[in-house]
Amino acid sequence: MCIRECTSDNDCIEEKKCCSNGCSNVCRAPVVPVPKPGTCPVLEEGGVGSCKQECTSDDDCPDDKKCCNNGCENVCRAPVLPISKPGNCPASHEGDFYTCSQRCSLDEDCPDDKKCCLHDCGNVCSPPVIPFKRPGTCPVTEEGGDGKCEQQCSSDEECTEDKKCCSNGCGKICRAPVVPIPKPGTCLEPEEGWGWYSKPLCIHDCWSDDDCFRDDKCCSNGCGRVCKPPQGLPAGWSSSGT
């Protein structure tokens, strides 16, 4: 039976909209468009935008494009994706003192290596927690292998003994590592303050010698780990071992 419930959204209660059901108009809950990742590019000052309406929401745009204002109308544009700095946000502990204010919205709003992290009272810039990584590498996943689609772990620290958190082709499981063979030579002892002055961001460039080019070794710089030329090699040594 074609009963008309409304003629406009104003006739509907709460957030419902006046929609056609193919026979008459009825009040229905709206479908809220989900914004696509990223932000719209910044408008160039003095730029001229085409006054042609291409979209009203991100859903109207193909692929990963977003519905953005060009200074005159809404058009589909490639998004600007946020830069995520290395590391994870620290856990928010009850009783931590933070001023209730929104100090950042993205990692790139924070200085140095700090990340934009959600705490009980808003987003603040916090030093990152570098995920623990055990020595060795994950075994190669066999092509065509049937990996069990379960998530046993998300990082090495969730695995027992010396096992690592590895992809099995579908999920992530704890596996015995392939242990790298250390390269010849030794690392120089880091000088006091070396890590802070020459490399203020405490980022790990490597975890083992295998991560370094040719003869370089993975050495502590007093704050993180970086690839450095080895010390104490026999005279005439080269990467070919001759």
Image (cartoon, helix red, strand yellow):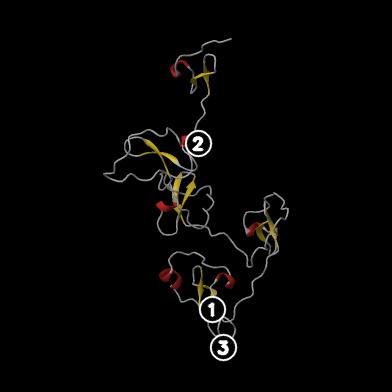
Circle 2: element type: loop
Which x, y percent locates residue 5?
A: 51, 13
Q: Is residue 138 left or right of residue 116?
A: right
**Quadrant for the C terminus in the image:** bottom right
| Residue 159 numbered tag | none
Which x, y percent locates residue 209?
A: 58, 73
Name the residue: 64% across, 75% down: 181
Which x, y percent locates residue 95?
A: 51, 48
Say whether disc 2 or disc 3 marks the residue closer to the N-terminus: 2
Measured in 3D between alpha carbons, the distance from the residue under mark 2 to the one under mark 1, in whole angstroms, is: 52 Å
**Label 3 sits on what residue type?**
Pro
Name the residue: 49% across, 47% down: 119
Say whether disc 1 or disc 3 marks the residue closer to the N-terminus: 1
The crowding category of the residue bearing disc 1, from other C-alpha atoms within 10 Å (few below 14, some 14 to 19, many at least 20), is: some
Image position of 19 with respect to 114: above or below: above
Q: From the viewer's perspective, is the residue at label 2 or at label 1 nearer?
A: 2
Say whether disc 2 or disc 1 marks the residue closer to the N-terminus: 2
Which x, y percent locates residue 76?
A: 42, 39
Circle 1: element type: loop
The furthest residue to the left: 46
Residue at the spot of label 3: 234
Residue at the spot of label 2: 34
| 165 and 94: which is toward the camera | 165
Q: Is residue 150 left or right of residue 87?
A: right
Q: From the viewer's perspective, is the residue at label 1 or at label 3 nearer?
A: 3
Image position of 5 with respect to 154: above or below: above
Name the residue: 54% across, 89% down: 236
Name the residue: 45% across, 56% down: 114
